[in-house]
Amino acid sequence: MSFCELCRKNDIQVHLTISENKTIHICMECNNNFTANYMGIELSSFQPGIYEFSGIRGKKHIFNVQRRVSPMGIGYEANEVTKDGSPGFTVAVMDGVDCDQQLLLEKLKTKVKKTIFKRYLKKSFSPYGGKTISIKDSEVTGRFEYNEDNDTPKLVIDGKEFTWEEFGRMLNSYEGFQFQLKIMDITEDIK
Ligand SMILES: [Zn+2]
């Protein structure tokens, strides 16, 4: 892994073309500073990287928190770092370039806490040793993730990865019911 050409501290995340034959390879924060300078926005102090949150029964959740500044607005994104590298929780917020950035970061932290405490699925064990995962209260929210092994996306629910087949089995008990599927941007708040 090579480091940002400007700060020499963070990993390269952005390849920025600054003139016809010059591209620089920089980190997200240096790119944010670039954009902010260009747009005349003052950025509040923020330390990108690892943040720790306490979830259900005190379980530790590690998130990599990054800021993203673009002409569209300012956003913060928290991606859970899991032990096996599988997708975990992702939480994001976004607001206009003139927003209160400290408040926006607080909003992200509040949203992370709310997210890691909420469960849509429940596990039950049969007396014969089998494990069944089912939907707790007839409602599920989650996230689609790229699936390199399949032509359907992965589903991430409760910070855990599922295939459509696994999700389909959870729906077996709802035969004859109707359902509603609504797709929203990752920064939107789910009620
Ligand atoms: Zn940098």
Image (cartoon, helix red, strand yellow):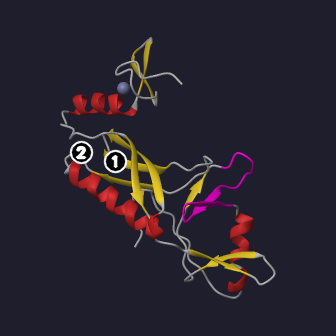
Q: Is residue 133 above or below residue 98?
A: below
State the quadrant of the N terminus: top right
Q: Is residue 4 something one can see in this rendering?
A: yes
Q: Identify the mark at residue 75; answer none if there is no mark.
A: 1
158 drawn magenta:
yes
User: What residue does disc 2 label?
Assistant: 97
Q: Is residue 123 left or right of residue 120?
A: right
Give the residue type that dot 2 points to.
Val
- Is label 2's Cβ within 8 Å of ligand 1? no
Mark 1 Cβ inside 8 Å of ligand 1: no
Which residue is the extreme one toward the top? Answer: 21
Q: Residue at x 58, y 49 (%)?
A: 83
* Location of ligand 1 given as a quarter of the image: top left
Measured as percent of width and height from the top left, residue 174 is found at 68, 85
Q: Which residues are magenta?
A: 147-162
Residue 118 numbered tag: none
Question: Taking 152 as reference, is 29 above or below it?
Answer: above
Question: Residue 189's spot in the image, x, y percent?
Answer: 38, 65
Q: Is residue 84 above or below residue 6?
A: below
Left or right position of 119 against 22: right
Check the image and report above or below for 122 versus 111.
below
Q: Residue furthest bottom?
A: 176
- Percent x, y of residue 130: 78, 76
**Which residue is rendered at x = 26% and y = 54% of the image?**
104
Looking at the picture, which amino acid does disc 1 mark? Answer: Gly
